[in-house]
Image: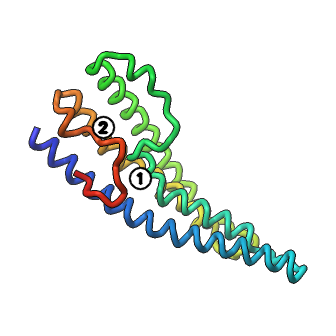
Amino acid sequence: MVILRRLVTGIAAINFLLSRIGRSIAWVLVTAMISVILLQVFCRYVIGDALPWPEEAARALMIWMMAMVSGEAYRRGSFVAIDMFLQALPEKASSLLKLALLLMAGIALVKLTSMGIDFFERGFRSRAASIHISRAWIYLAMPVCFFTMLLVNIELCLRELGCFLGHKKEFQIAMEVRADANPD
């Protein structure tokens, strides 16, 4: 159990650090996205001459913003979930089913990360039409997103394993995980 606790503590610390960095970057990206959109509104409706690049730039910023916070959202349980079946099961069966679902999600995340890396590599063959950068830099958001979610998935699997082994109080994440709280 000591080894499992140390693994969870280590991966939780990494996930906590990545979520803090991701949140900080996401705020900058949201600010830039809003600024670009406001610039386009000003140019289009006040000056009467729309710029060719703000829509594509805002879309790229939004994609990266989502990639920066998806791991934290997954860790907090902020994605849509139907869990009434899990709650209806006995505790051990519920824990075993959660672990199985997390393992399946982990397999999917490994595949998605690999596909995202391939997509990123192919992105060097084309350029964004109006912002004149390689599309690869926009596509890089997907493997970053899936990899941070995979790290969280590993933490959640280890935590669920600890819960299944009868140490629920030690391993369960409180639903109100605070963004600035210590991971353990």
Q: Is residue 66 left or right of residue 3?
A: right
Residue drawn at the location 38% of the way across and 22% of the way down = 87
Measured along the vertical axis of the image, is residue 92 above or below residue 43? above
Dot 2 lies on which element? helix
Measured along the vertical axis of the image, is residue 121 above or below residue 146? below
Mark seen at residue 157: 2
User: Which amino acid is tagged 1?
Assistant: Glu
User: Which amino acid is tagged 2?
Assistant: Cys
Residue 28 % position (x, y): 52, 72
Residue 72 % position (x, y): 41, 52
Q: Which residue is mark 1?
A: 72
Residue drawn at the location 44% of the way across and 20% of the way down = 85
Category of crowding for the residue at label 1, using alpha-carbon neighbours closer than 10 angstroms: few (below 14), some (14–19), many (at least 20): many
Q: Cβ–Cβ below 8 Å for labels 2 and 1?
A: no
Residue drawn at the location 54% of the way across and 62% of the way down = 65
Closer mark to the observer between disc 2 and disc 1: 1
Q: Is residue 114 left or right of residue 170?
A: right
Q: How is the image coloured?
A: rainbow
- Disc 2 from disc 1: Cα separation: 15 Å
Residue drawn at the location 48% of the way across and 60% of the way down = 68
